[in-house]
């Protein structure tokens, strides 16, 4: 384990009741690092994110965040420590306006109203589409806009690690490109670490410096992104080449 | 005289709204059919009676007292009891809340016995006579207070940090937790608020209804109908539901006769339940206030 | 052989001695009572129990009922029927089949008694249906059921009877009642009496028994502005009817109830709004009636007050009187055997502190009369019939404008 890792997961076992999904998962993310988590459907990628976010309680192993244990901390307190999850399927508060959704992201922040509204303006700058629809109900947005709103809500938590689960799912390639560009921009200005779970492996590897491959509940590889892109096995399995 | 009937219906609608609003809130936020609701209204009525009979406290002035006390009771009940079974089956939560209802009924029987009690401040039963119309002072006061409480509730849910957290928890529990909402705590606050609203209704209704240990079922029935008519979980809907039920009852009496006071209300209730399960007040997204 | 003779002799002596031992025996007669501790009749059930209890206490402090050579102490086996008909029927069946009682003291309300008396009948067990008087309970050809309240239809109609002689003579009558047995018979009796006496019944309507706010119905009553407004219902309804009557400022000349004005809860719940309302009771401490067990009505009242720290009431009195009637029948029959007691009981015609009790062929008490009670300045006073009246009826009721001016 790297001593100054932002997030270090060690030998993590996670189960839903009797059904074990993750076995002895090791994973590390350094400060400001962008990491992709790849793997086929049902491998346990979402489960891993949910365990880190505090929605699931691991059966064994450790999650260390910034030098302190994180396992067993409930989701509502995990986010206060600087980890945000943008969940699969957006999970916006459909009956609330865009502005309210974004404001909810800052629910746990204690750094003052001014900082929060500055961040809100920053998110609106990042996603001008949202600024135009700030008083609309989030449920009425298009798929791409909803994803922007979900990312914006994640950013509003002022994360040091932003975890994104399947952000391209159901979106047009144009929308995906736009969101990826904005994420890259956000990363440049804020420098937060990111953990990206993606079906769109090419997109993930463009953003990420490193990547892990998770297959049937175990990490089978972890390497530099460009080396994985060039790996014939990865190419065949995940890039369809 | 039809004007008199309409006027009565509006005023009774305010009473029904007061009964239904807290019930609807709890259902909307945590999908809990809270069978304790009627018992809390009843118990608050008895507390109001004792404050009035022992200390001479005006029932309307006892509203803040009962609201505060029942907020605490409701908060504790949810935090330490109901939260534990919220993830279990609906059946479990029905059994638990029914059990709590029975406990409250027995507390009432123990403390206040089965005597029929009434809170009778000097203005009880007094009316204004305006051009052939008769307007009960207490009913107007109840209408005004319940309208004010509904408005306050709306403003609270719409405009405050905790209010938004309640709505967020109602819309998507997990997503709310992911932005830092402590849902068990928010549920406790919600249940506390619902109990406080029930207590306000109980304090006021003690001046109209006669207190008996069987009122819990009557109140719960009305709360359920009102909440379903307005759309379960919809605060402003509860106000509409209250008025619809009250008009249906008056209409039943005028058109079909006194034996049909409740038939039309329940008829509309059933039709709404089947055709518009989200209530008469349209909503695009679940748990809009 | 001698040994056998001795044994035989001993046996003979034993047999001969046995009745001698039995002569002084004190036995226990267990009476089953399934009555409301909870539910909507909890209050009335409690009053009924007080009456039954008082009877038992007096019997037992006088060393029991003397029947033949034996003395019987009374013991009760109680169950809570939760004010529910089906529950009551089950409990009575349990009392008879499991607790083996031969005598039942009845529950409150005609509806519940309607169910329980049928069970008693099935097992040939005597039911003293002290607290039920809807005709329908009795007109089913029951042989083992005996009442104490006079017929339901007699109560409100006594108010109508009194009104016929008042000046100015009331012309119109409105009657409301919840949809249940006892209220219906009371309402029907009043309607028939009013029509017979030449009054016009302008409103005769039932409302659902679950209703707690009668404003819509009372608004209709206000439009008709009847001279007499009658409610045939139990206490809770009487209170909310009176509240609506005041809120809507209805001004009738006479307002009458089945239950209410005579009950302390009615007055404490309504304060001065209760004034001028008229109710009837099958009993009042002021009636000039007596028996050789409880004494006069005043004696009973005194004992009741001393024992329970509250004024007596007609429900408790009826319950006590039912016990007395059964006791006298057993004494006369010289047996506790149901088949021996039943014909004697059916032939009852006696004055009690409570009322005259005389059974018709159906077991209903047709010997009684109602006393009318009016609330005057927070006190319930007897105003009718003349032989029981403490004071004069205040008539017509002042209007709400007049009452407001005071």
Image (cartoon, helix red, strand yellow):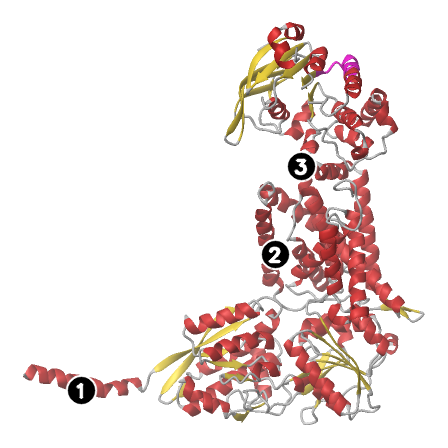
In the rendered image, residue A76, in percent from the top left (x then y), is placed at 67, 30
- Marker count (numbered): 3
- In the image, A136: left or right of C339? right
Instruction: Indicate the chain on which mark 3 is placed.
Output: B
Residue matched to label 2: B104
- In the image, B149: left or right of A85? right
Main secondary structure along the magenta-highlighted residues:
helix
- Residue A113 or residue B174, whichever sits in front: B174
At 68% from the left edge and 36% from the top edge, which residue is drawn?
B173
- Residue C305 or residue B32, whichever sits in front: B32
> The magenta stretch spans which residues?
A183-193
Residue matched to label 1: C12
Measured along the vertical axis of the image, is residue A6 above or below residue C62? above
Q: Which quadrant of the figure has residue A165?
A: top right
Q: Furthest residue to the left? A: C1
Describe the element under mark 1 as helix, strand or loop. helix
Residue A188 visible somewhere in the drawing: yes
Residue B227 visible somewhere in the drawing: no
In the rendered image, residue C273, in percent from the top left (x then y), is placed at 78, 74
At 83% from the left edge and 53% from the top edge, which residue is drawn?
B147
Magenta region includes residue C314: no
Residue matched to label 3: B183
Q: Furthest residue to the front? A: A241
Q: Furthest residue to the right? A: B131
User: Are tags 1 and 2 found on a single chain?
Assistant: no
Instruction: Indicate the chain on which mark 2 is placed.
Output: B
């Amino acid at each position: 384990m790297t001593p100054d890792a932002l997030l270090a997961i060690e030998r993590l076992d996670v189960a839903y009741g009797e059904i074990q999904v993750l076995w002895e998962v090791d994973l590390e993310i350094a400060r400001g690092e962008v990491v992709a988590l790849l793997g086929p459907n049902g491998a346990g990628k979402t489960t891993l994110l949910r365990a880190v976010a505090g929605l699931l309680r691991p059966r064994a192993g450790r999650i260390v965040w910034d030098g302190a244990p994180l396992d067993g901390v409930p989701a509502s307190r995990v986010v206060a420590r600087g980890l945000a999850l943008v969940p699969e399927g957006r999970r916006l508060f459909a009956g609330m306006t865009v502005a309210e959704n974004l404001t909810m992201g800052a629910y746990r922040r204690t750094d003052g109203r001014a900082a929060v509204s500055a961040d809100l303006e920053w998110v609106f700058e990042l996603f001008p589409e949202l600024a135009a629809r700030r008083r609309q109900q989030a449920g009425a947005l298009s798929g791409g806009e909803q994803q922007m709103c979900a990312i914006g809500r994640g950013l509003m938590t002022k994360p040091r690690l932003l975890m994104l689960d399947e952000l391209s799912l159901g979106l047009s390639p144009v929308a995906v490109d736009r969101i990826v560009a904005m994420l890259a921009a956000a990363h440049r200005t804020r420098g937060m670490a990111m953990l990206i779970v993606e079906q769109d492996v090419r997109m993930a590897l463009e953003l990420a410096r490193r990547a892990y491959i998770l297959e049937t509940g175990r990490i089978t590889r972890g390497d530099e992104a460009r080396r994985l892109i060039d790996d014939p096995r990865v190419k065949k399995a995940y890039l369809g080449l | 005289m039809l004007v008199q009937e309409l006027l009565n219906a509006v005023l009774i609608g305010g009473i029904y709204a007061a009964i239904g609003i807290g019930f609807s809130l709890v259902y909307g936020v945590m999908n809990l059919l809270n069978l304790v609701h009627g018992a809390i209204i009843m118990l608050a009525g008895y507390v109001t009676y004792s404050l009035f009979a022992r200390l001479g406290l005006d029932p309307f002035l006892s509203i803040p007292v009962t609201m505060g006390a029942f907020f605490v009771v409701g908060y504790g009940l949810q935090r330490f009891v109901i939260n534990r079974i919220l993830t279990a089956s609906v059946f479990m939560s029905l059994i638990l809340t029914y059990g709590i209802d029975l406990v409250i009924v027995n507390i009432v029987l123990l403390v206040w016995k089965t005597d029929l009690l009434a809170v009778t401040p000097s203005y009880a039963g007094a009316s204004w006579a305006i051009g052939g119309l008769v307007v009960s002072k207490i009913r107007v006061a109840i209408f005004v207070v319940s309208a004010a409480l509904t408005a306050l509730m709306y403003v609270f849910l719409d405009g405050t940090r905790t209010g938004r957290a309640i709505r967020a928890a109602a819309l998507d529990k997990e997503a709310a937790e992911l932005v830092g909402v402590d849902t068990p705590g928010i549920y406790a606050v919600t249940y506390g608020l619902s109990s406080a609203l029930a207590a306000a209704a109980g304090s006021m209704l003690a001046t109209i209804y006669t207190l008996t240990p069987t009122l819990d079922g009557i109140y719960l029935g009305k709360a359920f109908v009102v909440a379903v008519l307005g759309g379960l979980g919809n605060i402003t809907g509860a106000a509409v539901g209250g008025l619809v039920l009250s008009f249906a009852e008056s209409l039943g009496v005028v058109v079909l006769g006194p034996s049909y006071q409740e038939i039309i209300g329940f008829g509309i209730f059933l039709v709404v339940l089947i055709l518009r399960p989200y209530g008469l007040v349209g909503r695009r997204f679940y748990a809009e206030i | 052989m001698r040994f056998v003779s001795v044994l035989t002799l001993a046996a003979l002596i034993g047999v001969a001695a046995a009745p001698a031992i039995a002569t002084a025996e004190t036995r226990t007669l267990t009476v089953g009572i399934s009555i409301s501790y909870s539910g909507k009749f909890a209050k009335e059930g409690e009053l009924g129990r007080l009456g039954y209890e008082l009877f038992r206490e007096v019997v037992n402090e006088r060393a029991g009922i003397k029947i033949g050579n034996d003395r019987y102490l009374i013991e009760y086996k109680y169950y809570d029927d939760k004010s529910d008909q089906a529950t009551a029927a089950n409990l009575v069946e349990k009392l008879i089949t499991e607790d083996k009682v031969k005598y039942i003291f009845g529950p409150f309300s005609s509806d519940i008694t309607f169910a329980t008396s049928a069970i008693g009948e099935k097992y040939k067990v005597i039911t003293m249906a002290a607290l039920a008087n809807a005709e329908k309970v009795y007109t089913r050809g029951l042989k083992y059921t005996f009442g104490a309240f006079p017929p339901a239809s007699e109560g409100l109609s006594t108010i109508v009877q009194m009104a016929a002689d008042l000046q100015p003579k009331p012309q119109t009558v409105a009657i409301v009642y919840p949809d249940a047995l006892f209220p219906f018979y009371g309402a029907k009796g009043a309607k028939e009496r009013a029509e017979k006496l030449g009054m016009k019944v302008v409103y005769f309507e039932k409302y659902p028994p679950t209703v707690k706010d009668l404003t819509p119905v009372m608004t209709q009553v206000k439009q008709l502005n009847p001279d007499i407004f009658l409610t045939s219902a139990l206490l809770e309804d009487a209170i909310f009817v009176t509240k609506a009557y005041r809120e809507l400022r209805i001004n009738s000349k006479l307002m009458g109830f089945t239950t209410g004005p005579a009950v302390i809860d009615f007055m404490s719940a309504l304060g001065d709004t209760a004034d001028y309302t008229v109710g009837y009771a099958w009993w009042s401490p002021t009636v000039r009636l007596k028996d050789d067990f409880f004494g006069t009505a005043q004696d009973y009242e005194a004992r009741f007050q001393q024992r329970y720290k509250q004024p007596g009431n007609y429900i408790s009195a009826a319950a006590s009187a039912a016990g007395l009637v059964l006791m006298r029948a057993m004494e006369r029959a010289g047996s506790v055997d149901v088949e021996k007691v039943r014909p004697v009981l059916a032939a009852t015609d006696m004055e009690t502190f409570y009322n005259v009790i005389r059974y018709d062929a159906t077991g209903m008490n047709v010997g009684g009369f109602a006393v009318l009670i009016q609330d005057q300045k927070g006190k319930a006073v007897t105003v009718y019939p003349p032989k029981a009246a403490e004071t004069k009826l205040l008539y017509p009721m002042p209007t709400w404008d007049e009452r407001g001016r005071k």
